[in-house]
Amino acid sequence: MDSVRSLAAQSLRPDQIYVNIPEGPMKRHPERSYDETEIPTELTSLAPLVKINRCVDDGPATKLLGALRLENNASTLIITLDDDFEYPPTLVASLAWEAVMKPDDALGVCGWGMLPMWHEVGVVPAYVPYFMRPYGRYVDILQACCGNAYRRGFFTDVEALADIPPVCVTVDDVWIAGYLRTVEQRHSALISKRLDPSDPEWKKEEARSSERQMTLSSFNHEHQVHYKCVQALEEKFQRRWTRNFEG
C-alpha cells in the first residue's frame, strides 16, 4: 500500500492508477496462487482513482504489460513503478514534463549503460551518478524500480514484448529497454532531477534481518543474468542491440 499511497498524494495526480494483480499460479512459484491474495480494503476504497486489474502473470514486467493491454491511445503516458517503494510527490509531474520535452524517448529517474568487457561477462552495468546528468543523459537501460515513463505508442507489438525468454523474466528492465531499442528504435534517457524512491519501514526492517536471503538483484549480478538476457533478446529478434557507447 505504501507505493499506492505515495501515488495518490502526487502533486500532479494520475488520471488512473492501475494495480496489476495476476490471477492463477505464480509464474516464478507455480505451487502458489495469486487467487489466495487478500486485497486490502484500503486499496478498494481508493476507487475510481485506483483500479485493480486482475491479469496474466508476466513476472516483474506485469507492471507495464498490464497497462499496455488496457490502454489504446498512442499518446497516453504510462508511468511504471514498483510496489515496494514510496515515491517523491513530484515524480509524476517531473516525468510528465520531461515527456513533453523529449516526446520520442523512454524516460526514467535512474539507469545504467553497458560497458564492453574482454572476458566472458560480456557486459558490465555502469550506473550514472547525478553529477554526470545535469541536463539528463542517454543510457542503455532504465531501472524499473525508480519510475519510468513511456508513451503507449512506443509499443507496436505487445505480444512480442510479452513473449519474454525465461532468462529475462527477473530482469524486466533489460528486456523492456532492449525491445524498445532493437524493435522500436527508441532511446532511453534519464531525467535531470534526483527523485529516488525510498524504502518503507517494513522493507528497512526486512533488510536488517540476519536471516534475509540473497536479494534478486544480487542473484542477477552473480549469475550474469543481465548479459544472458541481452543475448537472448538479440537471438529472439535477430538484431543486435546497439549500445550507447557505440554512438
Image: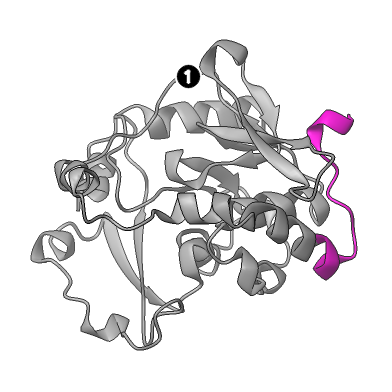
Q: Which residue is mark 1?
A: 193
- Residue 15: percent from left, percent from top: 37, 48
113 horizontally vs 107: left or right: right
Residue 129, quarter of the rendered image: top right
Q: Is residue 175 magenta?
A: no
Which residue is more in the foreground, 135 or 60? 60
Of residues 165 and 182, the one nearer the viewer is 165
| Horizontal relation, residue 20 to residue 78: left or right | left
Q: Which contiguous range is marked in magenta?
A: 234-247
The answer to whether residue 162 shows anywhere in this view is no
Q: Nearer the viewer, residue 71 or 63?
A: 63
- Mark yes or no: residue 235 visible: yes
Residue shown at 67%/66% (left/top)?
161
Q: Residues within 10 Å of mark 1 (few under 14, many from 20)?
A: some
SS at badge 1: loop
In which image quadrant can residue 195 be found?
top left
The number of discs equals 1
Please state the horizontal and vertical placement of residue 47, each as a whole percent of the image.
21, 60
Figure check: 85 above or below 179: above
Quadrant location of the C terminus in the rendered image: top right
